[in-house]
Amino acid sequence: MLKHKKLTSKNGITIPKDLREDVGLDAGMAVDIESRNGEIVIKKHTPICKFCKSIQGVKNIMGIEICPECAGKLLKAVEEKYGA
Ligand SMILES: [Zn+2]
């Protein structure tokens, strides 16, 4: 559905309710934004592992998006550094 909107003075934009509902976006949800072939694409945020860039099973731990494999490696490294 094509919508015409103006950017605010701070370059912001409100995504119309019907478009948000179409894709299941609610206030406060993270989004990914990228330019693609001269267009700006906004979509629900896909969690990506900070360390290996995997998207499989990624969870947010203390603000860090991390996959199970890297979480295991990190846990082992922490245990070695701090003793556990
Ligand atoms: Zn990872």
Image (spheres, helix red, strand yellow):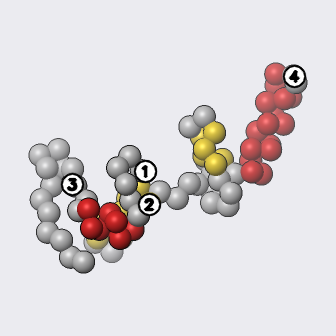
- Residue drawn 17% across and 44% down? 10
The quadrant the N terminus occupies is bottom left
- Residue drawn 58% across and 54% down? 48
Binning the other alpha carbons within 10 Å of mark 4 as few (below 14), some (14 to 19) or many (20 upward) gives few
Amino acid at circle 1: Ala
Question: Which is closer to the viewer, label 3 or label 4?
Answer: 3
Would you name the residue on which mark 3 appears? 13
Disc 1 to disc 4, how far (Cα)?
Answer: 36 Å
Mark 1 element type: loop
Circle nearer the N terminus (1, 3): 3
Amino acid at circle 2: Lys
Circle nearer the N terminus (3, 4): 3
State yes or no: discs 2 and 3 in contact (Cβ < 8 Å). no
Looking at the picture, tell me which residue is in the foreground, 37 or 18: 18
State yes or no: discs 2 and 4 in contact (Cβ < 8 Å). no
Q: Is residue 41 visible to us here? A: no
- Residue drawn 41% across and 64% down? 24
User: x%, y% of residue 43?
Assistant: 40, 63
Would you name the residue on which mark 2 appears? 44
Task: Say if disc 1 is inside 8 Å of ligand 1.
Answer: no
The quadrant the C terminus occupies is top right
Amino acid at circle 4: Gly
User: x%, y% of residue 76?
Assistant: 84, 36
Would you name the residue on which mark 4 appears? 83
